[in-house]
Image (cartoon, grey):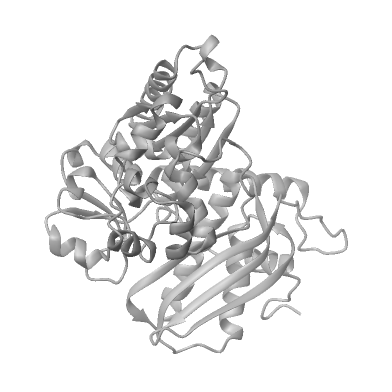
Amino acid sequence: MSTVPSRWIMHLDMDAFYAAVEQRDNPALRGLPVVVGAQPGGRGVVATCSYEARCFGIHSAMPINEAHRRCPDAVYLRPRMAHYLEVARQIRAVMATCTPVVEPISIDEAFLDVSGLGHLVGPPEVIGQRIKAAIRAAVDLTASVGIAPNRLVAKIASDFGKPDGLVVVPPAQVLDFLGGQPVGVLRGVGSRTLPILKRLGLNTVADLRGLSLTQLQAQLGPRAATSLYQQARGIASDRVGECTARQSLSKETTFGVDVTDPGVLRDTLRELAAEVAAAARQEGIAGRTMTLKIRFCGFETYTRQRRLPRHSDDARTLFAAAWSLYEAGHWQGKPVRLIGLGIADLGTPEPVQPDLFDGAAERPADSERERRLTVAVDRIHARFGACALHRGLSVTDAVGAAHCLGETPAGQK
């Protein structure tokens, strides 16, 4: 019987992506513990960190002050999301040259169906080496790759080989490979399930495999038990590219100190709008519904939505809608802990149709100039960060943004 699987699934995960980009861009940071996220003294968390920082026990989602306690000498950097998105776009372009079936699952990882490439490229090891080399040549970063008959085993394999790893698990070795893994690598094993499994003496996947489905159901319930029973035996999906379409896109900021200054809130919302708009343009999407999220010092949280006249990926339109919602909430003077902005009801960007009877309407030349300016600003943000350049709202801009929202700006009758 042939041991060649009908499908080979690759999971590709960039190593410490944000921190690796920062170390690449600034060689002086190489070899140093680098933490990307909030600044120490605030209330944010670690977005990611370099492997040098992980030696101190720092990890993603750790409170930033705990990270600083563990390694006060680390380099702490704010994220440059627009820049990371541009690098991610380059990496995805490399993936697309290797196989047409690519399913991004986050900014720095993706599943690829590399079935059938054996006749063109070679065995899985050669396919993995080729795509890792292509990514290094394109962006000077390392990726860890796992290749296996299905998504589950490929994902575990890529984690197993980090950093800069390449692990191939043929069908005949799936059970042995999984057996030695801790049960925590399986999907659905989290803070509630793991203690139950530990209490039963189930520390590895092989231990879990020793229980019958009925025994697992008695401890975990039918749904969780069936999932873990199948995973422990290497049964999982081998489909790539059938992911659910994105439903929303959002960004938010947690302030280190509660903010009451409306100028700070305006600037923060403007920056968030720029980040959301840039990310939307990267993905070729736009939102019809804009959401403002605000949390006050006592964790009292509100969300407000505004239906836009058309799908938009324009930062000024999103900011204008968000700020009008803030003002309508009568929250002025209340200490704000967190503020966020997002879009939903996603579609493709819709051009503004000029109103021939409206003197403020855009002319075709103005529209093309605006498009070129937006592209230029995106490039500046990608290279130097979102804070490098802000587009102010001139009187004309304010009229245009309000016009897109179907409103009359103050002072315009």
Q: x%, y% of residue 330?
A: 56, 89
| Residue reaching furthest to the right | 357
Instruction: Say left or right for 120 vs 285.
Output: left
Q: x%, y% of residue 384?
A: 38, 46
| Among the 4 quarters of the image, the one containing residue 174 | top left
Q: x%, y% of residue 122?
A: 47, 11
Query: What residue do we see at 73% from left, 67% from top?
Result: 403
- Viewport quadrant of the C terminus: bottom right
Residue 266 in the image: above or below residue 215: below
Res 186 visible: yes
Say which of 142 and 390 sits in front: 142
Res 373 visible: no
Say which of 17 and 311 sits in front: 17
Query: What residue do we see at 63% from left, 49% from top?
Result: 244
Q: x%, y% of residue 285?
A: 65, 49
* Count of marks overlaid on the render: 0
Say which of 311 and 347 sits in front: 347
Say which of 97 and 372 sits in front: 97
Residue 118 in the image: above or below residue 142: above
Query: What residue do we see at 21% from left, 36% from top?
Result: 27
Residue 117 in the image: above or below residue 55: above
| Among the 4 quarters of the image, the one containing residue 232 | top left
Instruction: Say left or right for 176 vs 53.
Output: right
